[in-house]
Image: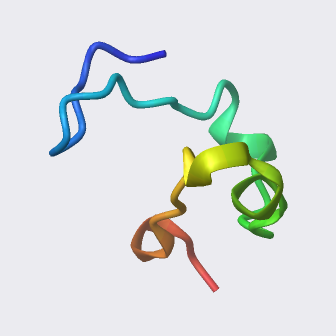
Amino acid sequence: MSSELSPRGYLLARVVDEERCLGCGLCEILCPEFGIHLDSTNHES
């Protein structure tokens, strides 16, 4: 968890190793309660 808060006041989860993240979105799909949101603006295509 990071120390950054979401607009709703929840602690945000962060990728542990960003170099290994593929940006596939599987974590976002599988996360209960929609707790993960991918921001694709930081990914290079």
Q: Residue furthest front?
A: 33
Residue 14 appears left or right of 29:
left
Q: x%, y% of residue 1?
A: 49, 15
Q: In which quadrant of the rendered image does the C terminus lie?
A: bottom right
Q: Is residue 36 above or below residue 14?
A: below
- Count of number-bearing discs: 0
Q: Which residue is at the front of the view, 2 or 18?
A: 2
Q: How is the image coloured?
A: rainbow
Q: Name the residue: 66% across, 24% down.
A: 16
Q: Is residue 33 above or below residue 3?
A: below
Q: x%, y% of residue 23?
A: 71, 65
Q: Which residue is at the front of the view, 9 or 20?
A: 9
Residue 4 appears left or right of 43:
left
Q: Name the residue: 61% across, 34% down.
A: 15
Q: Name the residue: 75% across, 50% down.
A: 21
Residue 40 appears left or right of 33:
left
Residue 45 appears left or right of 21:
left
Q: x%, y% of residue 32?
A: 72, 45
Q: Is residue 44 above or below residue 13?
A: below
Query: In the picture, residue 9 is in which quadrant?
Result: top left
Q: Residue furthest bottom?
A: 45
